[in-house]
Image (tube, grey):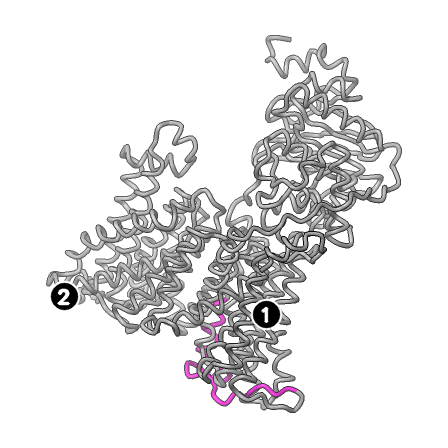
């Protein structure tokens, strides 16, 4: 359908719609027709349950699909929402208008309470910690019969009452539940496409780089976890209103299994995937009656098959069958230029860092002036990269001070100078091992550097394209990062750092793996960047590249500064020669 | 006297948990993969023993070699189906594939055996023995002995044999091991077989006194994880010590209060450990090599 429209009217400027969303539209129309015209009361009930699971999975897509954190607590949030509505509705006589908000707030509070510490953990610790939360909540529900009715649960939960209208079972209830799915889906879809969703996917793909691009990784993950809990709670509340009973079943592992399977089979991170997956998997045991007792076994097989054979799920397959049109490039716009700095921008005094017994950096002091290029050389393991890591906040120094334009930005728990805050203060860096998000285009990757300051994705991309143009790399913009050769990856990473408009730019071996022509080209670009007032610190092994470029050179050995002076003096300095060639050669 | 009996019960439970944790940590070290199915594999081993028992009218100890062999084969299937196709993809893929394997085992077991708790035959007679006026269940002592032999066997293989050296090399640095001519993929398969076999042995040991239900895996994987966490992520002796500590805690608190309280306290402890000392207990967070 979309194909014919685009062929007939190529000049028509239709908003871009992915095929996945197009198919969802068809599915929605078909479901509405089915529900209104053909469905039996039982069929409507199954459809309602599918809606409940779609809503829970949309929330799960935010934390798992976009944020990349495998939470096994989504079932627990579902159950908490269910119990909040169940207890307040059946025991306290509260109505929907009061119970529903509480069912959102209880999981939200639990998520915020436990999320803050466990979200810092690596992915599998996080998965197991959230599984632990789920087991504790289940244990509490079964063993507090006074509050929860214990293993038998609580009967007599009232139905939904909206503005005085008691929603009857059947079509009206299905319509209400699916209205919640529509609202929740629209909110999640908007968030996923916006700056917040982009930032979250960068946190998923490369949390280290995300921090150095000014994104608060912990806060983004916590918000995603909290939001997923709200969706889980809403789904749980609606499930209880459908069943009119709440029992420990809502907290058992099959709920989590269903949500995880729906998300992976439907397509990770996609609202469309959650809806398609829920409709398909909840109906599967209905279509194949012999599956009734063994549907969870089938879910397990489907989950395994999907993750091995089709890791992007149904929506991924649809995208492959109907590739979405590449979106047109924006018109490049120069970002507003900050006030250029003058004089000493970065001052490092007596910086030190040990790893175990190794003194990696030992009393390093240096000053970077605005518009200057400083070279940092030294044998392998001399502490060059550690200096960059200390300045950009990825490591915490044991001693010393780092001042940026006179402000103390030394990273520590007390001062609160984490990598993202240091990045926002004006320091950008590249990595020795270039890492760009594999699924992103070059334009996406560079625009990610602007997410914390530009008002929209469109604006960020326009600025990013301008920066790419400055490095003669605008033609790379639509290409996927995964396809680029090493030299171009370095160029893109430089563009990404430059897009931060930093006052200090730290480059870790920017010329490694480049040809002589490419090195000459890079040197021209670096001089042009310095000419705008940015202070550059360049870690490099290639003296033929670095010495003509740098105005000042420091040589490190075993964490100490051996040489600090003009580039001309490096080659003749006896201590530097000794450090590189061994003591006897001096 | 009761304290001593509880202590023996605790050590017996801990010895079985140690086998679970050992299998978990061996696979973790060899592949960096967290095997979420480890708990369900224990359950599968227990139910396998339950299923074999009517056909082999001998004490449980006679079922042990067959259980270990069949479970090792299951471990190979697990590695081929759920690990090898995903080894070069982001780690979350293996989390999900092993969770899926767990779901398949759990629900397959429910269909085959029903949800009721089942008991495997005791290792020997199932009676009690008196040692200096102390009456001890023979099964407890047998569990301790069998687990100790299996753990010692693993230690001996890893320390003294060519296979063990290759397995250790694979665990330390797979790239380097491959460069030195170690067949890394084969070693990973062996590790999965070994880890699964130990889970199965633990299942057989646990399934007599503590019964086995198809849904038992969730608690067991958490306990293996807590044991490995307490003992130091990746440390083999640490996993064994951690498992013993957990079991003693569980038996101790259960005897004074109740089993659900013990379990709740254990999980709460896990969360507290994660909150208070994430870096200290797990070592440095993974950093990009620069």
* Relative to B168, B117 lies left or right: left
Disc 2 element: helix
Task: Estimate the x, y position of residue A411 in percent, counting from the top left.
Answer: 71, 44
Task: Estimate the x, y position of residue A149 in percent, counting from the top left.
Answer: 46, 84
Do the dots labelled 2 and 1 sit on one chain? no
Q: Nearer the viewer, mark 2 or mark 1?
A: 1
Residue bearing mark 1: A231
Residue bearing mark 2: B54
Q: Quadrant of residue A194?
A: bottom right
Marks 2 and 1 sit apart, C-alpha to C-alpha, by: 49 Å
Q: Nearer the viewer, residue A434 or A313?
A: A313
Q: Nearer the viewer, residue B131 or A439?
A: A439
Q: Which mark is residue A378?
A: none
Let me know if residue A62 is in the magenta part.
no
Give the letter of the chain under mark 2.
B
Task: Estimate the x, y position of residue A475 in percent, counting from the top left.
Answer: 69, 36
Q: Quadrant of residue B42?
A: bottom left
Disc 1 element: helix
* Relative to A355, B137 lies left or right: left
Residue stretch in magenta: A134-162
* Relative to B273, A549 lies left or right: right
- Up-down: is A406 above or below A235? above
Q: Quadrant of residue A353?
A: top right
- Up-down: is A484 above or below B136? above
Q: Nearer the viewer, residue A459 or A402?
A: A459
* Relative to A580, A126 lies left or right: left
Q: Nearer the viewer, residue B283 or A444?
A: A444
């Amino acid at each position: 359908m979309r194909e014919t429209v685009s062929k007939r009217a190529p000049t028509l400027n239709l908003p871009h719609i992915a095929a996945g969303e197009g198919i969802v539209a068809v599915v929605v129309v078909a479901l509405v027709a089915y529900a209104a015209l053909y469905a039996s009361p039982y069929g409507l009930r199954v459809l309602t349950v599918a809606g409940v699971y779609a809503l829970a999975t949309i929330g799960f897509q935010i934390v798992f699909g976009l944020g990349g954190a495998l939470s096994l607590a989504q079932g627990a949030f579902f159950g908490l929402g269910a119990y909040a509505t169940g207890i307040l509705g059946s025991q306290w006589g509260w109505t929907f208008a009061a119970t529903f908000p509480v069912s959102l707030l209880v999981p939200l509070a639990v998520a915020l309470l436990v999320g803050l510490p466990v979200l810092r953990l690596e992915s599998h610790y996080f998965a197991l910690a959230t599984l632990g939360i789920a087991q504790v909540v289940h244990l509490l529900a079964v063993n507090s019969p006074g509050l929860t009715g214990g293993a038998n649960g609580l009967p007599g939960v009232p139905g939904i009452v909206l503005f005085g209208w008691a929603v009857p079972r059947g079509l009206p209830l299905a319509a209400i539940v699916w209205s919640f799915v529509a609202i929740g889906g629209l909110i999640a879809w908007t968030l996923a496409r916006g700056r917040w969703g982009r930032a979250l996917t960068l946190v998923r793909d490369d949390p280290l780089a995300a921090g150095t691009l000014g994104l608060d990784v912990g806060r983004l993950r916590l918000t995603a976890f909290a939001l997923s809990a709200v969706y889980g709670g809403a789904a749980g509340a609606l499930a209880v209103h459908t069943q009119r009973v709440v029992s420990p079943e809502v907290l058992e592992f099959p709920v989590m299994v269903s949500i995880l399977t729906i998300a992976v089979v439907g397509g990770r991170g996609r609202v469309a995937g959650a809806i398609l997956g829920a409709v398909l998997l909840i109906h599967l045991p209905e279509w194949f009656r012999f599956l009734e007792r063994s549907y969870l076994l089938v879910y397990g097989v489907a989950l395994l098959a999907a993750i091995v054979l089709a890791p992007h799920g149904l929506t991924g397959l649809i995208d492959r069958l109907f590739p979405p049109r590449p979106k047109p490039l924006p018109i490049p716009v120069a970002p507003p230029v900050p006030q250029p700095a003058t004089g000493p921008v970065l001052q490092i005094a007596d910086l030190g860092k040990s790893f175990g017994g190794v003194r990696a950096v030992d009393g390093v002091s240096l000053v970077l002036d605005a518009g200057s290029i400083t070279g940092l050389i030294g044998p392998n393991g001399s502490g060059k990269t550690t200096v960059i890591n200390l300045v950009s906040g990825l490591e915490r120094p044991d001693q010393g001070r780092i001042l940026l334009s006179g402000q103390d930005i030394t990273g520590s728990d007390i001062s609160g100078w984490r990598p993202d805050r240091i990045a926002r203060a004006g320091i950008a860096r590249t990595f020795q091992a270039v890492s760009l998000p594999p699924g992103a285009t070059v334009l996406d990757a560079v625009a990610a550097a602007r997410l914390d300051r530009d008002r929209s994705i469109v604006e960020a991309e326009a600025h990013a394209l301008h920066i790419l143009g400055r490095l003669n790399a605008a033609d790379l913009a639509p290409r996927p990062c995964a396809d680029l050769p090493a030299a171009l990856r370095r160029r893109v990473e430089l563009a990404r750092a430059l897009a931060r408009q930093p006052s200090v730019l730290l480059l870790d071996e920017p010329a490694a793996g480049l040809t002589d022509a490419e090195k000459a080209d890079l040197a021209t670009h670096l001089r042009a960047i310095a000419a705008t007032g940015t202070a550059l610190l360049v870690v490099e092994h290639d003296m033929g590249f670095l010495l003509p470029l740098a105005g000042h050179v420091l040589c490190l050995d075993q964490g100490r500064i051996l040489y600090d002076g003009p580039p001309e003096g490096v080659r003749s300095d006896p201590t530097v020669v000794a450090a590189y060639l061994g003591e006897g050669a001096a | 006297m009761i304290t001593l009996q509880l202590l023996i019960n605790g050590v017996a439970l801990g010895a079985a948990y140690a086998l679970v944790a050992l299998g978990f940590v061996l696979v973790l070290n060899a592949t960096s993969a967290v095997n979420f199915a480890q708990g369900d594999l224990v359950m599968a081993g227990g139910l396998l023993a339950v299923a074999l028992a009517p056909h082999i009218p001998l004490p449980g100890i006679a079922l042990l070699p067959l259980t270990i062999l069949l479970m090792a084969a299951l471990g190979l299937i697990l590695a081929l189906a759920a690990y090898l196709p995903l080894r070069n993809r982001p780690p979350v893929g293996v989390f999900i594939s092993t969770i899926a394997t767990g779901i398949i085992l759990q629900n397959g077991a429910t269909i085959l055996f029903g949800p009721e708790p089942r008991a495997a035959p005791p290792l020997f007679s199932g009676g009690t023995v008196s040692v200096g006026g102390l009456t001890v269940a023979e099964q407890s002592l047998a569990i301790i002995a069998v687990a100790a032999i299996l753990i010692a066997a693993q230690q001996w293989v890893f320390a003294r044999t060519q296979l063990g050296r290759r397995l250790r090399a694979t665990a330390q640095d797979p790239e380097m091991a491959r460069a030195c001519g170690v067949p890394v993929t084969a070693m990973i398969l062996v590790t999965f077989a070994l880890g699964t076999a130990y889970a199965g042995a633990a299942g057989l040991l646990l399934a007599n006194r503590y019964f086995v239900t198809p849904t038992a895996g969730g608690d067991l994987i958490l306990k293996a994880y807590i044991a490995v966490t307490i003992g130091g992520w990746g440390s083999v002796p640490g996993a064994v010590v951690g498992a013993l500590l957990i079991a003693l805690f569980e038996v101790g608190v259960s005897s004074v209060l109740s089993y659900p309280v013990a379990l709740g306290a254990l999980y709460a402890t896990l969360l507290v450990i994660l909150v208070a000392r994430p870096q200290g207990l797990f070592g440095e967070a993974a950093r990009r090599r620069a």
